[in-house]
Each structure stands twice: as C-alpha cells, then as structure tokens.
Amino acid sequence: MRNRGILTGEPLKNALPEYTEDEFLAILKDICTAQGTEAYQDDLLENFIEVTGHPEGSDLIYYPANGADNSPEGILETVKTWRQANGLPGFKAS
C-alpha cells in the first residue's frame, strides 16, 4: 500500500485519472512546501513522476524551464496541457 497523504489520509493513487485536480494540487502543494518527512516527500515525488508520465519528471518542480510557472497551480496546468497534447487521460471529475 502506498503512503497516505497528509491532508486527506487517503493512499496515493496509481494513475493520474484516479485523482481529482484538487487532490493532485494538494500533493503538489505538499511537495513544493516540503511538508512531512523525507520519506513522505520521496513517496510524493515518486508518485508525481509515475502518474504524470511527463518526460521532465521532477524537473517541472525543481528545475523548471525559463519563464515556466513553477507554482503548484502552474505545474498542474503544465501537466494537464502536456497530457492533453499527448492524448493521455486527465483528472477525474470532482
């Protein structure tokens, strides 16, 4: 079983379409504000890389392209745009 999120107590999910945008934004906020233990951060980051499938992976967070919005909301939009452009499913409805 995956680690549980700080905000909801829910286990991390195995695919992006299992998350609502709000759930995934909460994960991004925890990553960007370094919430929790190192192990928790590692679990969140691994989950982000796995479920987004984005080729830049954690660079979207830690080494964004020049001019990119690396706020949690900006990262969320980048992931959504990339997945849509590549024919990949998005988030589940809230």
Image (cartoon, rainbow, N blue to C red):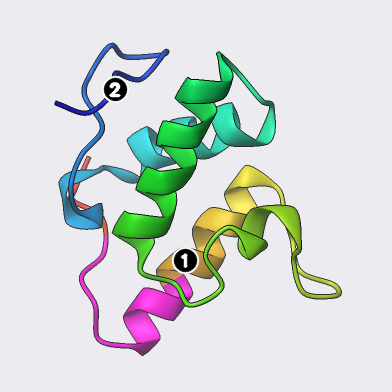
Question: In the picture, residue 19 is in which quadrant?
Answer: top left
Quadrant location, the C terminus? top left
Q: Which residue, given by chain and number where applicable, does mark 2 sit on?
A: 3
Neighbour tally class for label 1: few under 14, some 14-19, many 20 plus, Cα within 10 Å: some
Q: Residue 10's x, y, as percent?
A: 22, 19
Above or below, 62 against 60 in this view is above
Q: Residue 77's x, y, as percent?
A: 53, 62
* Residue drawn at point x = 25 percent, y = 54 percent: 16
Q: Which residues are magenta?
A: 81-90
**Numbered label attached to residue 40:** none
Amino acid type, label 2: Asn
Q: Residue furthest front?
A: 39
Q: Which residue, given by chain and number where applicable, does mark 1 sit on?
A: 79
> In front of the other: label 1 or label 2?
2
Question: In the picture, residue 20 is in which quadrant?
Answer: top left
Task: Report if residue 86 lies within the magenta region.
Answer: yes
Is 51 in front, or is 25? 51
- Distance from disc 1 to disc 2, alpha carbons, whole Å, reads 22 Å
> Position of 16 compared to 42: left or right?
left
Amino acid type, label 1: Val
Question: In the picture, residue 24 is in which quadrant?
Answer: top left
> Position of 81 compared to 50: left or right?
right
Q: Residue 44's x, y, as percent?
A: 44, 36
Q: Residue furthest right?
A: 66
Q: Mark 1 falls on what kind of element?
A: helix
Q: Mark 2 falls on what kind of element?
A: loop
